Image: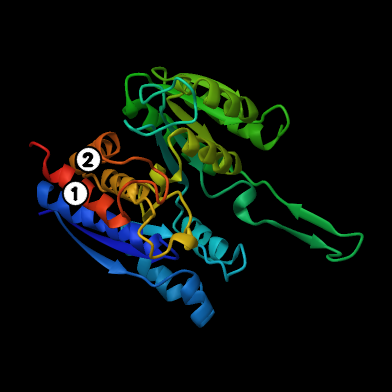
Amino acid sequence: MRHYRIAVIGGDGTGPEVVHEGLKVLAAVARREDFTYETVQYDLGGERYLRTGEVLPDSVLRELGQFKAIYLGAVGHPDVPPGILERGLLLRIRFEFQQYINLRPVKLYPGVETPIKNKGPEDIDFVIIRENTEGLYCGAGGFLHKGTPYEVATQELINTRQGVERCLRYAFEFCRQRNDQKKLTLVLKTNVLTYAHDLWWRVFQELAREYPDIKTDYNHVDACCMWMVKNPEWYDTIVTENMFGDIITDLAAILQGGLGVAAGANINPQGTSMFEPMGGSAPKYTGTGKINPLAAILALKLMLEFLGETRAAQRVEQAVAYVTAHKLKSMAAGQMGYTTSEVGDLVVQALEAQRE
């Protein structure tokens, strides 16, 4: 029998609540698809930091490396200064485990509203692949004469041939398997970032010759933001560097109906990977039952795909689509017409009602 070990980090605010609903769905789909799993809960996040001063102890990091998958709720606490948890927990996990792919499906489900006029589910269905361990987020840089009128602050954009090529190759392979459209768009700013992005452009051109079945395209990032809103149906698979990917995925989340349905994966194809909803910890909604758990449930779907449970992932997505089409009034917190727990129950019910 297929068996999986999954590390669970509920995190802060509403994170544990949405993860609870995701695990409820995992139990249901495991029964349907006849696989087993065990979860190990980890107390990481703002509360632990405030209580102990620790963000991610080395011993815990080593333990996490023994799992194929990490299921994360959210990290962010109003009493913890910005950057401590993000860099000490999220970025450290990404970098230490070489989760060099950030995978963000952008899909408008039936019944979900998009702010784009006259666009529907048939128009908004693409994937953004973001390089996840290089670029401006490496943390290279510093200050000179800090706090004086002569202060200098630097932040270095670092790309390596290996890092760029492995991301682009993943994107080509993903695009080839995704559907029959097979269109890959590179998004950069080659007219301004003429060194770092020239490396991306050259490697992209080289790899394109290895994948003659893939149609390739290029957008400057500002043009991509414009066309993503005007004509989202133009896109199939987008690949981009770290910072630009961080920005355009938030724009994409709004196009698909908001952070309540936006899920993402931090992937090392051969190692430990992490799956999470894109919304934050939303501390003002903690314990109110108002937060939308669908993004966490869709993150579970991505985790199942990564583990090779393709049919189980399809079941989860079909159940979510049924719930968005027939049950929920809105994707917004407090406006769904159901509590957080009830939405999880609805997905389970839809999953269990599926025919073989």
Quadrant of the image containing the N terminus = bottom left
Q: Quadrant for residue 313, please give it.
A: top left
Residue contact at pointers 2 and 1, CB within 8 angstroms = yes
Question: As displayed, is residue 223 above or below residue 20?
Answer: above
Q: Classify mark 1: residues with Cα within 10 Å, few (<14), some (14-19) or many (20+).
A: many
In the rendered structure, the answer to whether residue 333 lies left or right of residue 230 reads left
The x, y position of residue 87, in whole percent, is: 57, 62
Q: Determine the CA span between mark 2 and mark 1.
A: 7 Å
In the rendered structure, the answer to whether residue 34 lies left or right of residue 57 reads left
Residue at x 50% of width, y 82% of height: 52
Residue at x 50% of width, y 70% of height: 46
The x, y position of residue 153, in whole percent, is: 79, 56
Q: Quadrant for residue 140, please give it.
A: bottom right
Residue projecting furthest to the bottom: 52
- Residue under label 2: 319
In the rendered structure, the answer to whether residue 205 lies left or right of residue 212 reads right
Quadrant of the image containing the C terminus = top left
For the residue pair 258 and 155, the one nearer the viewer reads as 258
For the residue pair 286 and 311, the one nearer the viewer reads as 286
Q: Amino acid at mark 1?
A: Val
Q: Quadrant for residue 195, please give it.
A: top right
